[in-house]
Amino acid sequence: MTRPSVGMEIRLLADVPAAIPALSEWFHAEWHHYDGRSIAEIEAQPRDCLNRDALPITFLALSDSEAIGTVTLDTSDLPHYDHLSPWLASLYVLPSHRREGVGRALVKHLAAFALERGISPIYLWTPGSTRLYEECGWKVLCRDVYSGRNIALMRRALEP
């Protein structure tokens, strides 16, 4: 468990499985337009991530025991790039907690988890700004189009 700032902690989803319905709603609202999955279909994804030391694994940012953000280290996340692995996936922070360092703390926690296990490099894709990731050491590998939207594919080699 990591405590990046006062009032927030990062824990395994395996410790807080009751958060899965909320995560499923977040993911559906944020990414449904990419793959068309229903909330029920999306709910299977975090259930597969209830691991403690194996991939896929999901971390939650909690504030006063309320889930405010999440991130997953997964084996695949982007069709046509399945030869790359693993992936930082499903980074999401509640809009009311954005710009408070929650996303950055989740990204750093995931990187530390991977580094401790000798997992490197890690990939991600984003349809939005790459600034947060670049500030955390990620580099744009290429740009592509996914579901009709421009995305950046990024890579980070982890070093002690």
Image: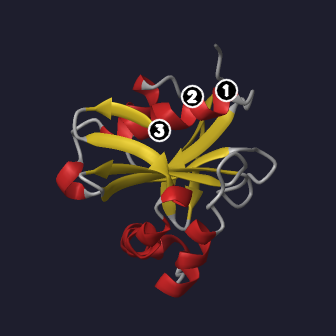
Q: 10 Å neighbourhood of mark 3: few (<14), some, or many (≥20)?
A: few
Task: Pinpoint residue 36: horizontal percent, then vertical percent.
Answer: 52, 81
Task: State the quadrant of the C terminus.
Answer: top right
Q: 10 Å neighbourhood of mark 2: few (<14), some, or many (≥20)?
A: some
Mark 3 or mark 1, whichever is nearer to me: 3
**In the image: residue 119, left or right of residue 139:** right
The disc label shown at residue 112, or none? 2
Residue nearest the observer in this picture, 105 or 13: 13
Task: Pinpoint residue 20: horizontal percent, then vertical percent.
Answer: 47, 71
Q: Can you say whether 116 is above or below 83 in the image?
A: above
Task: Pinpoint residue 61: horizontal percent, then vertical percent.
Answer: 37, 48
- Alpha carbons under labels 2 and 1: distance apart: 6 Å
Residue 93 visible:
no
Residue position marked by numbered label 3 in the rendering: 1
Residue 15 visible:
yes
Task: Pinpoint residue 102: horizontal percent, then vertical percent.
Answer: 31, 41
What's the amino acid at mark 1? Glu
What's the amino acid at mark 3? Met
- How many numbered marks are there? 3
Marks 2 and 3 close (CB-CB < 8 Å): no
- Alpha carbons under labels 3 and 1: distance apart: 14 Å
Q: Can you say whether 5 is above or below 10 in the image?
A: above
**Which residue is at 71% across, 55% downward?**
76
Q: Earlier in the sequence, mark 2 or mark 3?
A: 3
**In the image: residue 94, left or right of residue 89:** left
